[in-house]
Image (cartoon, rainbow, N blue to C red):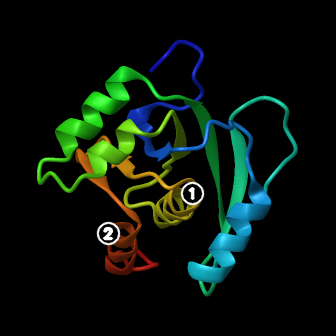
Amino acid sequence: MTTGEPLSRESAFVVFAQSTGTTVDVDAWNAQAARFFGARIGLAETSTSPPTALVVAPDGESPGVRRVYSRPRHADDLALAEAADATQTGLALLARRCTSVWLVERVEEPDRLALRLAIVMASVMLGPILDARAPELFGVKTGRAKLDGVRPDR
């Protein structure tokens, strides 16, 4: 973790982003979540300092708050992605094209809300998701399958 970073790779999903913006685009994320992922996303609070707290409200499940933080992609992010892409799916090559990453806070294990938020973000920002705990690099389709495999009541 870089000094001063509010979230660490080890406590978050890392979403690689092809866009260089560090601003939360809650309208785009909410539209994507509602259209394709059966959820709503909104700001939990107005804050000028990162990380940003978001409400994640899946249809038929309890909502919750997860924090997100954006920063430039570091060389060690890419190294972890390449090591995690053991099956050589090509996602590490996609990660290489991404200039920034978003850290999505995980507060429990498994964390359905964090996973759903990471999937929505990855689908908008066109990048893979790194679970540094596993380590595993996966895309939206695998993320959906993981979400389907984790019951709402754990």
Q: Position of residue 147 (x, y in %)?
A: 40, 73
Q: Residue at x 36, y 37 (%)?
A: 96
Amino acid type assigned to the residue bearing label 1 in the image: Met
Does label 2 or label 1 sit earlier along the sequence? 1
- Residue pointed to by mark 1: 121
Residue sitting at the far bottom? 60
Q: Position of residue 4 (x, y in %)?
A: 60, 15
> Which mark is on residue 83?
none
Q: Position of residue 129 (x, y in %)?
A: 40, 51
Question: Is residue 147 found left or right of 137 in the rendered image?
Answer: right
Query: Can residue 30 be seen in this snapshot?
Result: yes
Question: Is residue 126 found left or right of 78 in the rendered image?
Answer: right
Q: Position of residue 42 (x, y in %)?
A: 77, 62
Towards the viewer: 139 or 117: 139
- Residue pointed to by mark 2: 142
Query: Can residue 38 be seen in this snapshot?
Result: no
- Kindly indicate the quadrant of the structure image that contains residue 38: bottom right
> In this picture, is 101 found above or below 13?
above
Callout 2–callout 1 Cβ contact below 8 Å:
no
Amino acid type assigned to the residue bearing label 2 in the image: Thr
> In this picture, is 146 found above or below 49?
below
Task: Give the alpha-carbon distance from disc 2 to disc 1, as whole Å.
Answer: 14 Å
Q: Residue at x 47, y 47 (%)?
A: 15
